[in-house]
Image (tube, grey):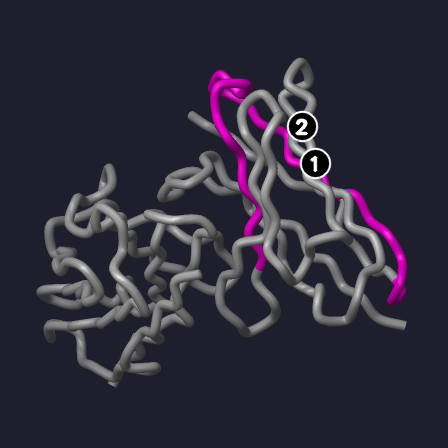
Amino acid sequence: EVQLLESGGGLVQPGGSLRLSCAASAFTFNTYAMTWVRQAPGKGLEWVSVISGDGGSTSYADSVKGRFTISRDNPKNTLYLQMNSLRAEDTAVYYCAKGGLASFVDWGRGTLVTVSS
Amino acid sequence: EIVLTQSPGTLSLSPGARATLSCRASQSVTNDYLAWYQQKPGQAPRLLIYGTSSRATGIPDSFSGSGSGTDFTLTISRLEPEDFAVYYCQQYGSSPITFGQGTRLEIK
């Protein structure tokens, strides 16, 4: 059974940084693109970023471009999201999902990021 | 980017009723790559339908999807108590992936 486990969320001040991780298991990690999706409290789902299986191609939502960096460590089966210059509007549950330009069967449970002073 | 508009925002129905949820795209969805998700409080979204009308593994046949181009529908033929949740559509035919704003299905 595919497992995705996010970690690294927490409370951070505006302008601060945080790195999220997503540990994957039970599938051949390096053959799948991976995606980050977020959900602000009480709001809908927002696509954030995607990375190809080999890490050579990335894409970002306009709302995070230039501030967030997606990366992966294939030998460690781990996906990352480095978040810099955080804003209050980045407050959300961040989910990792298996796949790229696709529908998502497999999601993690999410990790909450709160940006507040 | 393709904007998805779901309607209604909230749907109030009784168990046993039929639910019809709509998702309209601002432009044609490539290859009708349209998915539907169910989300309950505190949980990750659950894939119900992909490719407009294909049910994901383990999804009961009370859930069905239809449509093409810019207009898509999720139908729940007979509502069970566990079906009351928020439903999102998603297009994955073109980048960036986009989601609708959601329809809340509540017990009447």
Find disc 1 in the rendering and name its residue: A80
Residue B66 as seen in the image, left or right of residue A76: left
Q: Secondary structure at mark 2?
A: strand
Please report contact status of discs 1 and 2: CB closer than 8 Å, yes or no: yes
User: Camera-side residue: B59 or A82?
Assistant: A82
Above or below, comparing residue B106 to residue B25 in the picture: below
Above or below, comparing residue B97 to residue A115 in the picture: above
Residue found 59% across the figure and 52% down from its top? A48
Label 1 marks which chain's residue?
Answer: A
Above or below, comparing residue B64 to residue B93 in the picture: below
Residue found 61% across the figure and 70% down from its top? A41
Residue B43 as seen in the image, left or right of residue B106: right
Q: Is residue A14 magenta?
A: yes
Label 2: how many Cα within 10 Å (few below 14, some 14–19, many 20+): many
Q: Is residue A95 magenta?
A: no
Of label 1 and label 2, which has the lower sequence position? 2
Residues shaded magenta = A13-38
Q: Secondary structure at mark 1?
A: strand
Find disc 2 in the rendering and name its residue: A72
Q: How many marks?
A: 2
> Could you say where residue B26 lies in the image, as x and y percent from the top left?
32, 69
Residue found 29% across the figure and 64% down from its top? B27
The answer to whether tags 1 and 2 share a subunit is: yes
Q: Quadrant where the N terminus of chain A lies?
A: top left
